[in-house]
Amino acid sequence: MSIDVSQLPMVGGHPALELANTLERGGESPHDFLTDSSALLRWSVRVSVVSDAEADQVGRAWRDEPAAAHAGLAAVRDIRESLYLVLLAAITEADGSTAGDPIAAGAALVALQQRWSGAAARARFVLDSSQVRLVYGTVPAMLVPDRIAEAALDVMLTADLTRVRRCPVLEGGCGWLFLDQSRNGSRRWCRMADCGNAVKARRLTERRRAARSSSS
């Protein structure tokens, strides 16, 4: 049984990468943790895309206008897929090949720009003490997708994309994305306590089985 979005491990190191990890892409039927607008709202609070007070505003807006809730969820899923394609193209595999498709990533960047342009059109400048900030998410019904678009822009422009990693699927990992923030850039697993130890235990079992077969 798949875990609920409320128990989903946070391993990405940035809300935009956490978003990419809300879809399990392995297997024939990938599991989407953002099952509905309610799950999306709970997840948004967990990763601090919105505050509790803002989540209440969004929840009321979505209850009053269910079509807006469906549109918000669809927009976030669209941003998630486009961002995943872009980040995948930035990942260099162990053999030196690119993990993603540069052509697909180019099309995804266009889609992300369109999503961000819509979010920016709804943003406003706010004077906060002696600092002016651009605040995204001024329309409650679109607050979540607008903040997600902002997060996607932030990770693409400010993060070192050469530090984006994918938990190694070919070695038994889960395929989740994360920012390698280790000092020497040597992190390989989303979480050593999960995929890393699981793969090590499986390899140890295989070696022991092979040893028993050889001795017999």
Image (cartoon, rainbow, N blue to C red):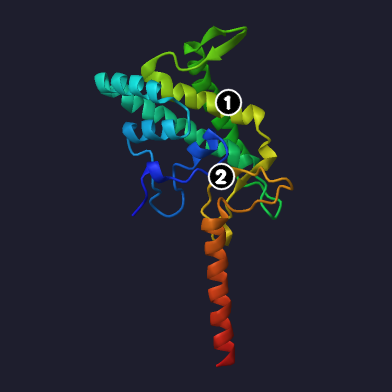
Q: Earlier in the sequence, mark 1 or mark 2?
A: 1
**In the picture, residue 144 is in which quadrant?**
top left
Quarter of the picture containing the C terminus is: bottom right
Q: Residue at x 55, y 38 (%)?
A: 85
Q: 151 or 128, which lies in front?
A: 128
Whether residue 104 can be seen here: no
Q: Residue at x 53, y 8 (%)?
A: 126
| Three-letter code for the amino acid on which mark 1 is drawn | Leu
- Label 2, on which residue? 177
Q: Position of residue 16 (x, y in %)?
A: 53, 34
Outermost residue toward the bottom in this view: 216
| Three-letter code for the amino acid on which mark 2 is drawn | Leu
Q: Position of residue 167 (x, y in %)?
A: 57, 52
For disc 2, the neighbor class at 10 Å (few under 14, some 14 to 19, many from 20) is many
Whether residue 189 can be seen here: yes
- Left/right of residue 143 with respect to residue 204 in the rendered view: left
Q: Please report contact status of discs 1 and 2: CB closer than 8 Å, yes or no.
A: no
- In the image, residue 24 sits, relative to residue 37, either above or below, namely below
The circle drawn on residue 59 is none
Find the distance from the CA under tag 1 to the CA under tag 2. 17 Å
Q: Residue at x 40, y 54 (%)?
A: 28
Outermost residue toward the right in this view: 184
- In the image, residue 10 sits, relative to residue 55, either above or below, namely below
The secondary element bearing badge 1 is classed as: helix
For disc 1, the neighbor class at 10 Å (few under 14, some 14 to 19, many from 20) is some
Q: Residue at x 55, y 62 (%)?
A: 197
- Label 1, on which residue? 153
Quarter of the picture containing the N terminus is: bottom left
Q: Position of residue 38 (x, y in %)?
A: 32, 32
